[in-house]
Image (cartoon, rainbow, N blue to C red):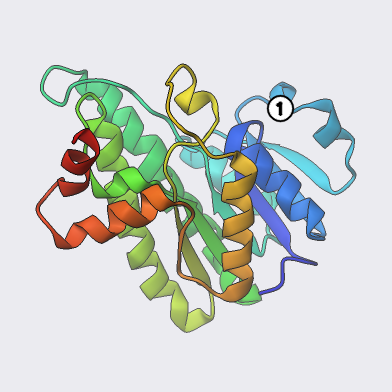
Amino acid sequence: MRVSGQTVFVTGANRGIGRAFVSGFLARGADRVYAGVRDPLSVDAELSRDPRVEVVRLDVTDRGGITAAADAAGDTTVLVNNAGAVVFESLLTGSPESARRLFDTNVFGPWELTRAFAPGLRASHGAVINVLSAIAWFSPPQNGAYAATKSAAWSLTNGLRSELAPSGVSVQGLHFGAVDTDFSAGVDIPKIAPEDVVRASLDGLEAGADEVLVDAESRAAKAALTGEPNGYLRAMQG
């Protein structure tokens, strides 16, 4: 698939990786980018002024809003499921309600969005990009619920790929380690830029890659799956 000429819908488009996806698609010649955001006023002026960008109000946990977005953006040929949430809590003592909200956002949101956009994607032989994480393959303390959602989203991505492939729709799983966004603010670790994530994803889209491992961290975490459970985490901790 060539990025040039595509019509794209990006969730969580107002900041971080989502914002970088909007810019990345525009730079490669996308005809139109729908910027899905919970608060349209949060979209910066630069994007709002671009005639190729249309801001769409969307909460990925709202089924009615998902249906409305799919109806409003029925010409979408590439869906980017980027919107996400994180909570740093113990699996044993953390809030079950917070964990359920994480699953609603990180798993059921992309699932329902893909279902809603599937008819148009099938008709256009389009593509889905699911923004996942290296954490899909290990579970650190105080971040287990988030890791569980990304693991579930990885499995969901593989299942959606199998069901959409006969219609000529590609489904990319995008994995990476720490990225310099609000998610990792205040954590003093090496981070890659959101633009690096997007560049790798769009290169993979044009190359037809089902899975894109952006950095060394994601490649090491994937490779460690052949070893002991959570082996990558123990290797990191020394």
Closest to the observer, 74 or 55: 55
- Residue visible at 23% across and 24% down in the picture: 142
> For the C terminus, which image quadrant?
top left
Q: Residue furthest front?
A: 238
Task: Give residue 139's position: percent from left, percent from top.
Answer: 21, 38
- Compared across the picture, whether 37 is left or right of 181 comes to right
Does 74 appear above or below 177? below
Residue 120, can we see it?
A: no
Q: Nearer the viewer, residue 168 or 183?
A: 183
Q: Quadrant of the N terminus?
A: bottom right
Q: Amino acid at mark 1?
A: Pro
The percent position of residue 234, horizontal first and vertical second, equals 16, 40
In the foreground, 190 or 228: 190
Give residue 124's position: percent from left, percent from top. 65, 74
Nearest to the observer: residue 128 or residue 230: 230
Please indicate whether residue 67 sits to the left or right of residue 6 in the image: left
